[in-house]
Image (spheres, grey):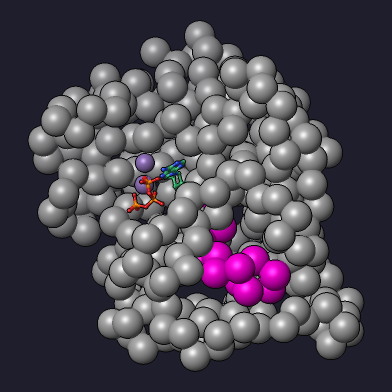
Amino acid sequence: MRTGTASATASRKTTRPTLSSPDRVVYPDAGITKRDVFEYYEAVADRLIEDAGDRLMSVVRCPDGIDGERFFQKHLGPAFKSLHRMEIAENDGKRAQYAWLDDLAGVLSLAQMNVVEFHPWGSRVKTLEKPDRLIFDLDPDEGMAWPKIKAAARELRDTLAEFELQSFPRLTGGKGVHLVVPIARRYAWDQAREFADRFAHAMEARAPARYVATMSKAKREGRIFIDWLRNGRGATAVASWSLRARKGAPVAMPVTWDEFARVRSADRFKLRDAMKRVDAPIWDYAGARDQRLPKAADLH
Ligand code: ATP
Ligand code: MN
Ligand code: MN
């Protein structure tokens, strides 16, 4: 599954950007510095690129560490080196410059620019208008116990399987879970979004005590919001292997369903835990790349 390891290693010497302010503290609670973050991204770059490479990217920057002001940035100008750029029409029709990366130099230049989180689109740049994965973002009500969240993720997995859709779990590093569903690059954004919308509402209809498919938090009341809005054009979700700008330096970590059965929280994997599993095979994604969406009529 991993690609580009040899060439990334070979090019490392020439592409490593200078790291400024290496001793600046990024995670005060965990004593993690900008150098640690940079070295983390150097170590996991191939895995991050596997998930986020060739995708338009938004980032979360924390120039003063995670307790300081943070910036969710969609438009990365020339100050961000070693990136590829693309001018696109945004959904309101306005033209804007977006950026994407496909190598270690791009990853490290963003780390140098105080990027902590990576948030890619659901499509690749060469097929920008055809998403290649859906994401169901399970957002539990505040304080919901982990076993409930876990049971919900498995119920969604099993329901997706009824439609012959294989899904892969990612612990967000925050409160919830993302189910990632690879799909063939043959559907327009509206089709993908419509399926995600209908699926989320079908779950709510089946188990209204457990799921809600509309955004307003007031309506959550002990339920899980199935956030299907991650599936529109221009929407993002945090990349696998991205650090989160939250206490303890948790990582958005893909896990197998077997591992998922054993973990105890969505922020189980911290920076150092992630480093240790950088070579582990995790998702067996390849066989699912060509998955087809069911017809809308099949979703009751
Ligand atoms: P958690 O498990 O705690 O919910 P999460 O990453 O799923 O973690 P959400 O708040 O559910 O967090 O957001 C889902 C995704 O929506 C994010 O990963 C991000 O890509 C995108 N997102 C969040 N906030 C913004 C924002 N202010 N502007 C644009 N996109 C955002
Ligand atoms: Mn979420
Ligand atoms: Mn959400």
Give whichever of 222, 199 is nearer the camera: 222
**Residue that sits furthest to the top in the current view:** 297
Query: In this rendering, is residue 102 above or below 193?
Result: below
Give whichever of 166, 172 is nearer the camera: 172
Give whichever of 232, 34 is nearer the camera: 34
Residue 153 percent across, percent down from the top left: 35, 47
Q: Residue at x 28, y 82 (%)?
A: 29
Report whether 207 appears left or right of 1: left
Residue 240 percent across, percent down from the top left: 55, 60
Give whichever of 280, 54 is nearer the camera: 54
Query: In this rendering, is residue 294 above or below 23?
Result: above
Query: In this rendering, is residue 131 above or below 10?
Result: above
The boundaries of the magenta stretch are 108-119
Q: Residue at x 29, y 24 (%)?
A: 214
Task: Decide whether residue 113 is among the magenta residues.
Answer: yes
Is there any visible trace of residue 100 in the rendered image? yes
Image quadrant in which you'd find residue 294: top right
Image quadrant in which you'd find residue 197: top left
Report whether 29 appears left or right of 39: left
Task: Decide whether residue 48 is among the magenta residues.
Answer: no
Residue 6 percent across, percent down from the top left: 86, 80
Q: Residue at x 13, y 54 (%)?
A: 143
Q: In what quadrant of the picture does the C terminus appear?
A: top left
Give the image quadrant in which the ligand numbered 3 is located: top left
